[in-house]
Image (cartoon, coloured by chain):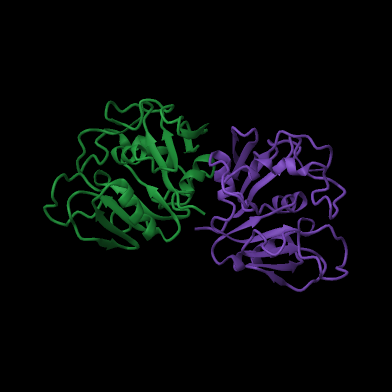
Chain colours: A purple, B green
Amino acid sequence: MPQLLRVQNFTVTRDGVAAGADQSFARPFGLDGAEQLFAWAGATASWPNRTEPGGSRGLDDYFTRDFAHDIGAEIMGRNKFGPQRGPWRDHEWRGWWGDQPPFHTPVFVMTHHDRPSFTLSDTTFHFVGGDPATVLKRAREAARGKDVRLGGGVTTIRQFLDADLVDTLHVVVSPVELGSGLRLWQSPDAWLDRFHREVVPSPSGVTHHLFWRR
Amino acid sequence: MPQLLRVQNFTVTRDGVAAGADQSFARPFGLDGAEQLFAWAGATASWPNRTEPGGSRGLDDYFTRDFAHDIGAEIMGRNKFGPQRGPWRDHEWRGWWGDQPPFHTPVFVMTHHDRPSFTLSDTTFHFVGGDPATVLKRAREAARGKDVRLGGGVTTIRQFLDADLVDTLHVVVSPVELGSGLRLWQSPDAWLDRFHREVVPSPSGVTHHLFWRR
């Protein structure tokens, strides 16, 4: 089986916005009300952060359930990892996810600024420079035959799309408006020259857009 | 996490028919044209029997991809295993699936007639009597904390539903008519007193019905 590069559960507003311009510790997405974006995932039985039993096992649950399935590594942009910019002042920040990050695989954080790798539970974070193809090569090796998740954010996904390295994308359009910000697309039709697409409305109100290479 | 009993990818005609009355070696489902029922699954990239690359990675693929995910054992009725009835004349028949069955776990075949267990590749078939609750208990032990798949056929699924042992059902309604036979339901609304349901039309033409306990 080929090792795919997969975008999964990446959620945008009705306008295609996934992040605001002013990211901070208090606003990881730089948007007020960003938690509304992910309400669809939090309602499912298989949401990785779920602490209580219950949750739906309908369509949306197939997507949260698939988050870690056959994934051996993640690639993320530095802004998904934290709100810092420029050289690391210290190494105290270890991501937004506490002592038990939901990745359970090696994670490659793309940054021009060196920093030593570290491990939290069963997730190891590596900080890597280089172009998308070089980073993908490292992540594939670490994934040991499994697929690689492209975790975002917007800028990182667009970089890998520009380099034509993405095999599948699952983008969730949430029926909310959160103002302006970084847009994943101008229109969900923007990629149809390169990808097949299915658009699947969910009973929960979100719409799943599934893309795979032509 | 609880160990669920899950029906997955169980496909019926527009009328709810999943098998005909006259099963034989040549007609495992006792229906002419039964292969039309499963065309939706065969078109996906993750279909377990796929031998060539390709296939769709849209909605239907999430369902075939989930077939083995977190499953530790399968329960099936004797008629899913083979067309024989009554005591086993010999032990030559080892199922429809060749030397590499797609289960990769212990499989419990429900029958009143004793037969020794045997192993093909990484699938071991056990032949068990007893009521559904007793068989489920054995399958759960064998599944080592994972879920149990209820593989069918119709009669077996109805037995477990009557005993209120099923946690989730994924039933695929294919837009074909193959004549009369064993019906899974008189109407897909029949179970709404006990289950939540979502009905999700797929671009491929089938409709996915997702049920989970209230």
Q: Position of residue A115 (x, y in %)?
A: 79, 71
Note whether A172 is above or below B72 in the view shown: above
Quick one: A142 or A116, which is closer to the camera? A116
Q: Position of residue B101 (x, y in %)?
A: 33, 55
Is residue A213 visible to us here?
no
Q: Residue at x 87, y 67 (%)?
A: A87
Tell me the quarter of the picture where residue B24 sits.
top left
Note whether B183 is above or below A71 in the view shown: above
- Residue that extends furthest to the bottom in the rendered view of this protein: A116
Q: Residue at x 77, y 51 (%)?
A: A155
- Residue that extends furthest to the left in the rendered view of this protein: B89
| In the image: residue A144, left or right of residue B183 | right
Total numbered badges shown on the rendered structure: 0
Tell me the quarter of the picture where residue B72 sits.
bottom left
Quick one: A64 or B145, which is closer to the camera? B145
| In the image: residue A24, left or right of residue B198 | right
Note whether B157 is above or below A27 in the view shown: above
Quick one: A119 or B97, which is closer to the camera? A119
Q: Position of residue B102 (x, y in %)?
A: 36, 54
Q: Position of residue B8 (x, y in %)?
A: 42, 43
Note whether A22 is above or below A206 in the view shown: below
Is residue B159 visible to us here?
yes
Quick one: B23 or B74, which is closer to the camera? B74
